[in-house]
Image: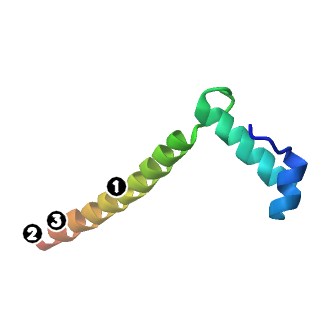
């Protein structure tokens, strides 16, 4: 959106064309111009939810093992 073209940015900052175009696409999603993917905020939320889901699954596995252990002890 600035005064430079994609090839100028690629050359000036020694980046690849595909990376700059991905950044532009993501910026357009974040600005609401595009709706063909997740915004940066949605990606961050999804990552946090996946991390929490993993932790909760581990917690459930620990509780299952503890339940089995204590059930064995009470017999």
Q: Quadrant of the N terminus?
A: top right
Categorize mark 1 by other alpha carbons within 10 Å: few (<14), some (14-19), many (20+). Answer: few
> Disc 3 or disc 1, which is closer to the eye?
1
Q: Nearer the viewer, residue 49 or 4?
A: 4
Secondary structure type for disc 3: helix
**Residue at the image point whose x is 64% and y is 34% from the top:** 29
**Residue at the image point whose x is 54% and y is 45% from the top:** 43
The answer, for residue 2, to whether it is visible in the render is yes
Which badge, 3 or 1, is on the more N-terminal residue?
A: 1
User: Given contact means CB atoms under 8 Å apart, are the residues at marks 2 and 3 in contact?
Assistant: yes
In this figure, which residue is indicated by the disc labeled 2?
74
- Image mark for residue 56: 1
Q: Quadrant of the C terminus?
A: bottom left
> Disc 2 or disc 1, which is closer to the eye?
1
In the depicted structure, whether residue 21 falls above or below residue 63: above
**Residue at the image point whose x is 20% and y is 63% from the top:** 67
């Amino acid at each position: 959106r600035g005064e430079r073209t994609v090839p100028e940015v690629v050359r000036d900052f020694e980046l690849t064309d595909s990376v700059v175009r991905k950044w532009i696409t993501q910026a357009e999603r974040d600005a609401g111009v595009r709706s063909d993917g997740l915004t940066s905020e949605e990606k961050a939320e999804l990552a946090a939810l996946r991390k929490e889901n993993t932790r909760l699954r581990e917690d459930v596995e620990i509780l299952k093992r503890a339940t089995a252990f204590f059930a064995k002890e009470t017999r």
